[in-house]
Image: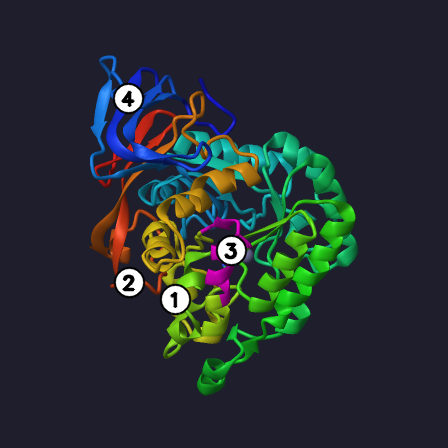
């Protein structure tokens, strides 16, 4: 059987035996077995019979629903030198991610039903995890004319975003929200007021002053978040704020949620772990949008994950090549790869720090994003897709970009000693990563 995201499901059965099974969607946390059969979860419980199928021993490992990353740049079509669906989905698998929402700021952008169909057909051919495309909000992602949102959804778009830019025109933002509300699809905003950021290339603060670089104030994010919260309240649209980085934005989102505004948001591992100090001496691998901010903002982000203001962790995996990164800081492209470091960084900053427990993190990586973006998966309940991530939360390794499955090497985490890694990854009942290596 081939599903909409192009995955074929594996016939036969697979038993994952004796791991700590964590399924936040069903409140499961205990040592038991998971039986997969014909591409679905058949059963979860102690002492299950493999029925003659393959057995994966998971003793000492965590068995979780496959991770769902709602913010990934696969760069295909148009920038295949940076990443392809083949390499990006392999990077996802290595990071324990079994479903990616592919951002539409490709070249050309994904702004028509035919482009959605193209991505889905490429994904069916080359992908090793599920690819669910997001469509543009505006034609050519120019922020002027609304794209055919209904047609995009019909073709398979699971979210809408002009990511990379904010929708600066409030009339367009409002119209798009009225439409996304009717279509019941999240409106995803990259919140940075283009007029306020001007020529800023990093967070505006002590570090930008010291380096003599033009800064981007967090006010740029706050203005768009404030506007969008009002628009979401008025239209009833599901607003999802991508990669929140500012303390004040988080306060506004928290307050809006308390009033029942339909808003959710995501945090990236890099905004949780790093500050603008990571730019160091003009290190372009730490150049990202929105920018890495000061410690005050980083701590506010961790607190917001802890109290539930932040709904999901997403990588914002943004591969770039040496041509875009080995240049002057101000000229360098923004973005860093993130799929293959998301799990260990999140474990470090959220779980080992004591901010939350392991089931809490698994929820942010799997059940919460699947539910908010209306995607199948994110649970090990019987009958669900057989998407499973088996990981070792303690496995120690050193980040080496040359070993990435992604084509992107642009990470500020090179050389960092981390703990936690996907060991076995299963998509639709098929093993795509076994013992830490691609199958
Ligand atoms: O740093 C970023 N890079 N932020 C974005 O929003 C877009 C992304 C990219 O596409 O490179
Ligand atoms: Zn963005």
Q: Nearer the viewer, mark 3 or mark 2?
A: 3
User: Residue 346: where, in percent of width, then height?
Assistant: 37, 54
| Residue 100 magenta-highlighted | no
Q: CA distance from mark 2 to mark 4?
A: 35 Å
Q: Residues within 10 Å of mark 3 (few under 14, many from 20)?
A: few
In the image, is 32 to the left or to the right of 106? Answer: left
Q: CA distance from mark 2 to mark 1?
A: 10 Å
Q: CA distance from mark 3 to mark 1?
A: 30 Å
The mark nearer the N terminus, 2 or 4, is 4
Secondary structure found at label 1: helix
Q: Residues within 10 Å of mark 1 (few under 14, many from 20)?
A: many
Please report contact status of discs 3 and 1: CB closer than 8 Å, yes or no.
Answer: no
Q: Nearer the viewer, mark 3 or mark 4?
A: 3
Q: CA distance from mark 3 to mark 4?
A: 37 Å
| Residue that numbered label 1 is attached to | 285
The mark nearer the N terminus, 2 or 1, is 1
Quadrant of residue 422 within the rendered picture: top left
| Residue that numbered label 2 is attached to | 414
Q: Residues within 10 Å of mark 2 (few under 14, many from 20)?
A: some
Please report contact status of discs 2 and 1: CB closer than 8 Å, yes or no.
Answer: yes
The mark nearer the N terminus, 1 or 4, is 4
Secondary structure found at label 2: loop
Query: Image height check: is 386 above or below 103?
Result: above
| Residue that numbered label 3 is attached to | 307
| Residue 148 in view (yes/no) | no
Q: Nearer the viewer, mark 2 or mark 4?
A: 4
In the image, is 179 to the left or to the right of 85? Answer: right
User: Residue 433: where, in percent of width, then height?
Assistant: 28, 36
User: Residue 217: where, in percent of width, then height?
Assistant: 59, 74
Is ligand 1 less than 8 Å from the beta carbon at label 2? no
Instruction: Tell me the residue at 41%/57% (across/down).
Output: 269
The mark nearer the N terminus, 3 or 1, is 1
């Amino acid at each position: 059987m081939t599903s909409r995201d192009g995955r074929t499901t594996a016939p036969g059965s697979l038993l994952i035996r004796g791991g700590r099974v964590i399924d936040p969607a069903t409140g499961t946390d205990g040592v038991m077995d998971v039986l997969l059969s014909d591409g679905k979860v058949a059963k979860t419980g102690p002492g299950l019979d493999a029925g003659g199928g393959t057995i994966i021993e998971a003793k000492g490992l965590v068995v979780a629903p496959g991770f769902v990353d709602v913010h990934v740049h696969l760069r295909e079509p148009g920038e295949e030198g940076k990443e392809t669906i083949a390499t990006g989905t392999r990077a996802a698998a290595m990071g324990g991610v079994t479903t990616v929402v592919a951002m539409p700021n490709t070249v050309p952008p994904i702004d028509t039903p035919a482009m959605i169909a193209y991505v889905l057909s490429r994904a069916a051919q080359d992908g090793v995890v599920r690819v669910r495309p997001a469509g543009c909000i505006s034609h050519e992602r120019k922020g002027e004319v609304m794209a055919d949102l209904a047609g995009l959804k019909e073709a398979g778009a699971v979210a809408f975003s002009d990511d990379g830019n904010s929708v600066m025109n409030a009339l367009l933002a409002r119209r798009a929200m009225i439409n996304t509300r009717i279509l019941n699809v999240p409106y995803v905003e990259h919140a940075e007021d283009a007029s306020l950021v001007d020529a800023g290339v990093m967070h505006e603060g002590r570090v930008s002053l010291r380096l003599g670089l033009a800064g981007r104030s967090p006010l740029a994010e706050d203005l768009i978040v404030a506007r969008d919260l009002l628009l979401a309240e008025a239209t009833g649209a599901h607003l999802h704020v991508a990669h929140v980085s500012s303390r004040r934005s988080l306060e506004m989102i928290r307050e809006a949620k308390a009033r029942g505004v339909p808003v959710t948001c995501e945090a990236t591992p890099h905004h949780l772990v790093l500050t603008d100090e990571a730019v160091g001496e003009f290190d372009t691998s730490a150049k990202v949008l929105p920018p890495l901010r000061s410690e005050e903002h980083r701590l506010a982000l961790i607190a917001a994950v802890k109290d539930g203001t932040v709904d999901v962790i997403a990588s914002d995996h943004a591969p770039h090549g040496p041509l875009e990164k080995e240049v002057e800081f101000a000229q360098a492209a923004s973005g860093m790869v993130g799929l293959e470091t998301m799990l260990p960084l999140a474990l470090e900053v959220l779980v080992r720090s004591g901010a939350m427990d392991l089931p809490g993190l698994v929820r942010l990586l799997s059940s919460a994003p699947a539910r908010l973006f209306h995607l199948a998966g994110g649970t090990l309940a019987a009958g669900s897709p057989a998407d499973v991530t088996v990981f070792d939360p303690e496995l120690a390794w050193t980040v080496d970009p040359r070993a990435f499955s992604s084509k992107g090497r642009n990470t500020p985490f090179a050389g960092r000693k981390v703990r936690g890694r996907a060991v076995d990854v299963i998509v639709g009942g098929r093993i795509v990563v076994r013992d830490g290596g691609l199958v």
